[in-house]
């Protein structure tokens, strides 16, 4: 069985167990989800403790750690597991700097098994408030994800759009002249409850998708 088949099987079992009872469905789904997430956290905790014991310095700046506070675990290869060989410790600031550099390279993200691709936007104070771009390289691998979360850095809120729904708006005539034809998605001032899709090169109308903003803090 591959991971997709395992997931389908688990979903089927939970649905059979719950029948028409939404409370039973919620509890079983949360029960399985939380325990699988805990399994992953336990492996992280073990790796981090062992790296501390080996007294390895910060992978970013090379300095030793003053204490255990604000020390992050960083995976060298983010497509691989949290294992002793694939992990290093970093100061919180060094870690964040390292991911900022990574983000600047802006290539298509690798497949990390996440069902949701998170696109984050800072706040703008102009005719629009948030702005996300979808590059053609990202478009090509969108089907790896079940949904895209358009997230707002200042509020932590995000709007989740299922990938098949999003694709309906990312049409060739709506590509802009930015990059090699990025699609632009914004939140326009006065229309905060909608995602606005830029007209692009040959289309002349903005398209709007109702947005539901949720606070869905994720780990890592
Ligand atoms: Zn450091």
Image: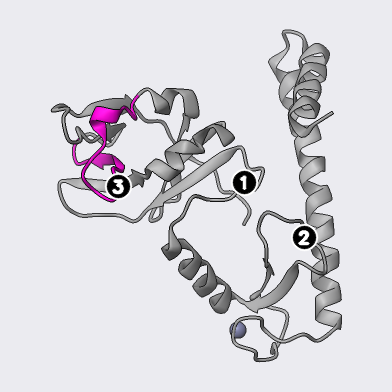
Q: Residue at x 45, y 43 (%)?
A: 138
> Where is the N terminus found, in terms of image quarters?
top right
* First along the sequence among labels 3 and 2: 2
Q: Residue at x 34, y 56 (%)?
A: 122
Instruction: Find the distance from the CA under tag 3 to the CA under tag 2.
Output: 35 Å
Q: Position of residue 219 (x, y in %)?
A: 63, 53
- Is residue 153 rendered to the left or right of residue 196? right
- Circle 1 sits in a helix, a strand or a loop, which is it? loop
Please give the label number shown on residue 146: none
Residue 204 falls inside the magenta stretch = no
The image quarter containing residue 67 is: bottom right
Residue behind mark 1: 111
Instruction: Find the distance from the CA under tag 3 to the CA under tag 1.
Output: 22 Å
Q: Position of residue 144 (x, y in %)?
A: 58, 36
The image quarter containing residue 84 is: bottom right
Q: Residue at x 27, y 41 (%)?
A: 186
For this rendering, which residue is in front, 54 or 145? 145
- Stretch in magenta: 169-190
Please give the label number shown on residue 180: 3
How many other residues sit within 10 Å of disc 1, few (<14), some (14-19) or many (≥20)?
A: some
Considering only vertical position in the picture, is 108 above or below 83? above
- Is residue 155 rendered to the left or right of residue 5? left
Foreground disc of the pair 3, 2: 3
Please give the label number shown on residue 82: 2
- Is residue 117 rendered to the left or right of residue 168? right
* First along the sequence among labels 2 and 1: 2
How many other residues sit within 10 Å of disc 2, few (<14), some (14-19) or many (≥20)?
A: many
Residue 184 falls inside the magenta stretch = yes
Q: Mark 3 and mark 2 in contact? Answer it, CB < 8 Å.
A: no
Determine if the C-beta at disc 3 is less than 8 A from ligand 1. no
Ligand 1 is found in the corner quadrant, namely bottom right
Foreground disc of the pair 3, 1: 3
């Amino acid at each position: 069985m591959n991971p997709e088949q395992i997931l389908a099987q688990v979903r089927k079992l939970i649905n059979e167990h719950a029948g028409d009872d939404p409370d039973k469905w919620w509890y079983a789904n949360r029960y399985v989800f939380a325990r699988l997430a805990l399994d992953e956290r336990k492996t992280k905790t073990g790796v981090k403790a062992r790296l501390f014991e080996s007294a390895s310095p910060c992978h970013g700046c090379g300095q030793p750690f003053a204490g255990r506070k604000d020390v992050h675990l960083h995976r060298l290869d983010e497509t691989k597991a949290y294992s002793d060989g694939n992990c290093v410790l970093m100061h919180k600031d060094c870690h964040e700097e390292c991911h900022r550099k990574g983000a600047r390279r802006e290539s298509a993200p690798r497949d990390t098994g996440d069902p949701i691709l998170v696109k984050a936007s800072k706040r703008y104070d102009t005719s629009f408030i948030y702005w996300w771009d979808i590059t053609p390289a990202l478009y090509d691998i969108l089907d790896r994800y079940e949904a895209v979360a358009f997230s707002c850095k200042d509020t932590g809120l995000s709007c989740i759009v299922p990938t098949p729904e999003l694709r309906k708006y990312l049409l060739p005539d709506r590509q802009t002249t930015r990059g090699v034809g990025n699609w632009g998605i914004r939140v326009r001032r006065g229309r905060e409850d909608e995602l606005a899709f830029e007209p692009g090169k040959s289309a002349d109308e903005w398209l709007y998708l109702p947005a539901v903003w949720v606070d869905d803090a994720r780990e890592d």
